Image (cartoon, grey):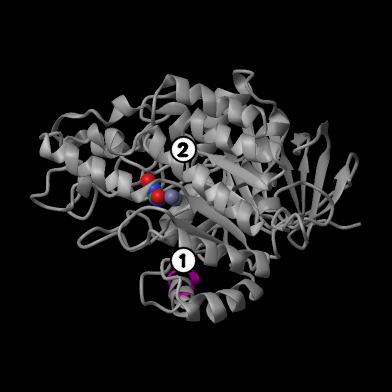
Amino acid sequence: MTFDTIIRGGTVATASDTFQCDVGIAGGRIAALGSDLGTAPEIVDASGLLVLPGGIDSHVHISQPSGPGIVMADDFASATRSAAFGGNTMVLPFAMQQKGESLREVVKDYHKKADGQCYIDVSFHLIIADASDAVLGQELPALVHDGYTSFKVFMTYEGLALSDMEMLKVMTVARETGAMMMVHAENYDAIRFLTDRLEQAGKTGTLYHGASRPIPVEREATHRAISLAELIDVPMMIVHVSNGQARDEIARARRRGLKIYGETCPQYLMLTEQDMDGLNMEGAKYVCSPPPRDKESQQACWEGLQQGIFSLFSSDHCPFRYDDAQGKLAPKGKTSFRWVPNGIPGVETRLPILFSEGVNKGRISLNEFVALTATNHARTYGLYPKKGTIAVGTDADIALWDAKREVTISQSLMHGGTDYTPYEGIKVTGWPVSTMVRGRFVVRDGELVGKLGAGDYVPREKSELAKPRAA
Ligand code: DUC
Ligand code: ZN
Ligand code: ZN
């Protein structure tokens, strides 16, 4: 057998096994796993390194409209470059519809933004803001058919929040088409009420972002979304869960036999509400929704990962610059937390943080790490087994890790479009040194070697998890 590349001498880990073996790559795919694979034009010495499936970050926001005067810090080039340095080989951003827009046109626009601009592979989720008959009856089913097999809906945010009636209609389409539905679960009216009350009391600093959407706001919406999904008998992913009470809603639903899945993110393991308490709105750097909570919530999110209540660990990368007229403090003259764009960067730091805090500190196994950061994403969103594992026949999407490298996270090490990292100064052990997409290095020994445009758009199959119970 002839190979283009052999990765030699490394320790391979998948979601189920860890083993010493060489990896033979031909035509962008893994062609053999074993020892004594012979020779190849390119031999990669991986001795002392881990050979892991490249990370799949299935929750990132790139080049998304974010309000008047506000511009996201990453385009597809900078986001996918940053993701590659963070050990990722694929990201799934959102093609976001705004009210009145044709979903098909939105998707075309996102393709225009992404075409030729990606260093690693991408695929799009949809965001449904306009649950009109035309969108739900025609555009959405046609797009699911064409490989856009997942979509997100919001229970909060001006212009995005769906009513319960709309949620039920959307869920019906998800059930009929086999799409995987992702839900942002926060109670819109409660947030508006609490925000008004805080402002009336002069509590406008960024710290109060947390008080404007406390845990019951998320728990109630999570419970409601689950109840609605139960009525329709449709599977659902509750994204970015931040605390134990929302986690427990998911766990209870699962005990009732419902196909309700959960995702959490680095900010809910590493940050707390206090991080938003910064002078001169500096806390804006940490404003995201749901907000970071407290130590108890962090522990609850770890347990959610350990117990399999959360099957996905994603970044919710949503980058805005801080020191920039179009960034976090863009809405000039509006000094309340209400106007701070929600979202923090994290696509480059997601994997090192979970590796260091999870695997190295003994909270999760290496195989659980692979499942939570790659394999489960591929399974959840119709990419498995092409993506998300190391096996003969799969795409050679691989990250080489130095499990012992000690790094202090710092903005100076980042490769994206933001001007800060919320994880500045955090010490991690374990770092992705090289990233390879379909057999070609994008990052090699810490250097960018991939070509802009080498990342492909990947249409997806339907999720293996999205089949209704009664189907
Ligand atoms: N919240 C969201 O709902 N989306 C992006 C970022 C954020 O904080
Ligand atoms: Zn969200
Ligand atoms: Zn998000």
Residue placed under numbered mark 2 in the picture? 219
The x, y position of residue 287, in whole percent, is: 30, 40
Tell me the amino acid under the disc marked 1. Answer: Ile
Residue placed under numbered mark 1 in the picture? 128
State yes or no: Cβ of the residue under disc 2 lies below 8 Å from any atom of ligand 2.
Answer: no
How dense is the environment of label 1, judged by Cα within 10 Å: few (below 14), some, or many (20 and up)? Answer: many
The x, y position of residue 423, in whole percent, is: 39, 31
Please name the residue shown 70% across and 36% down the image: 255
Q: Look at the image and tell me in which quarter the C terminus lies.
A: bottom right
Frontmost residue, 241 versus 118? 241
Magenta stretch prevailing secondary structure: helix
Q: Is residue 347 visible?
A: no
Q: Is residue 446 above or below residue 188?
A: above
Residue 138 sits inside the magenta stretch: no
Frontmost residue, 80 versus 187? 187
The x, y position of residue 412, in whole percent, is: 35, 37
